[in-house]
Image: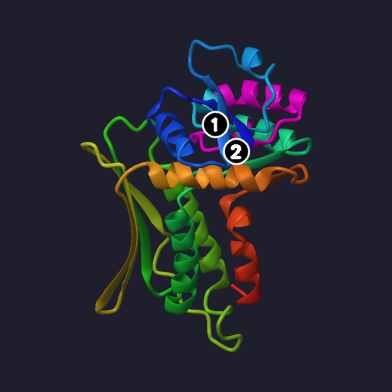
Amino acid sequence: MIRILLTGAGGKMGQTVVQAAALDPEVKIVGLVDKEDKLEDHLAKEVDCIIDFSVHHFSPELVKRATSRSVPLVMGTTGHSPEELAEIKQAAQKIPIVLSPNFSLGINAMEFLVRIASLVLGKSYDKDVIDIHHNTKLDSPSGTAKRLLEVLVEAEEKGNEGLDQKAEKKPRNRLPQVHSIRAGTVVGVHTVMYCGPGEVIEITHRAENRFPFALGSLKAAKWIIGKAPALYSMRDVLGLDRITSVLAL
């Protein structure tokens, strides 16, 4: 039984994690931390891992407290400033941290597909990310959209060389962009669009509810127990980097 302390417990994602954990016999939520609660009081309990879906400006205190108690962190909070990210990376030298903008297994599989499509289609195709969320989402673009953009840019740097070492480098049309829409109650829709000569290819992930993100965070919490201090991602949790390496992507 993995004992989990949940921060950001009063938010939509926090409430979903509580529901998902109640259905999983391998985990137990032993503490709920929200805006008015003191983190230190809850860390006095026996805790195996912290799952965080709070707000980015809480992260410095969170990593400081987690480091002092040597408690692994699974962080789903997005919108961090460069300074906040630097503190997270520094803490990861002392404790294991899984930091991911999206814990959905589907989104992480989508990253893999985007990488392959980018290499196959090459630089002559225009590429864009479309990011749609509910009108109360705080950050724009979403952390997931930023990550998909990173994957596109990384693949752009390789061009077609990953598939054919003799292939000539094709001219770049323009840099990929992110287009964000905040409307209604949409949980989350991410699309990577490739526009080329006479054709359009779209890779889309639609979240029908928040359970995929909650289930992924619990999977990460189980995985991180016993890991060495480092900054990990869901790609590490799912072993996607090993697959990418084997395929030379």
Quickly name the residue at label 1. 52
Say which quadrant the N terminus sits in: top right
Q: Would residue 236 appear left or right of 186 to someone viewing this image?
A: right
Disc count in the image?
2
Q: Would residue 39 appear left or right of 20 to someone viewing this image?
A: right
Element marked by disc 2? strand
User: Relative to 164, is 79 above or below?
Assistant: above
Would you identify the image quadrant in which residue 138 lies?
top left
Magenta segment: 58-83
User: What amino acid is at disc 2?
Assistant: Val
Residue 166 visible in the snapshot: yes
Q: Mark 2 or mark 1: which comes first in sequence?
A: 1
| Residue 56 drawn at (x, y percent) | 52, 28
Q: Residue at x 42, y 22 (%)?
A: 10
The CA distance from mark 2 to mark 1 is 6 Å
Quickly name the residue at label 2. 74
Q: Find out whether residue 233 is within the magenta segment.
A: no
Which mark, by number, is residue 143?
A: none
Would you identify the image quadrant in which residue 128 lies?
bottom left
Q: Find out whether residue 80 is within the magenta segment.
A: yes
Q: Residue at x 53, y 85 (%)?
A: 168
Q: Residue at x 63, y 24 (%)?
A: 62
Say which quadrant the C terminus sits in: bottom right
Which residue is the extreme one toward the bottom? 166
Q: Would residue 241 appear left or right of 100 to someone viewing this image?
A: right
User: CB under 8 Å between callouts 2 and 1?
Assistant: yes
Circle 1 Cα neighbour tier, 10 Å, few/some/many (<14 / 14–19 / ≥20): many
| Residue 154 drawn at (x, y percent) | 55, 62
Which residue is the extreme one toward the left? 184
Q: Would residue 113 appear left or right of 69 to someone viewing this image?
A: left
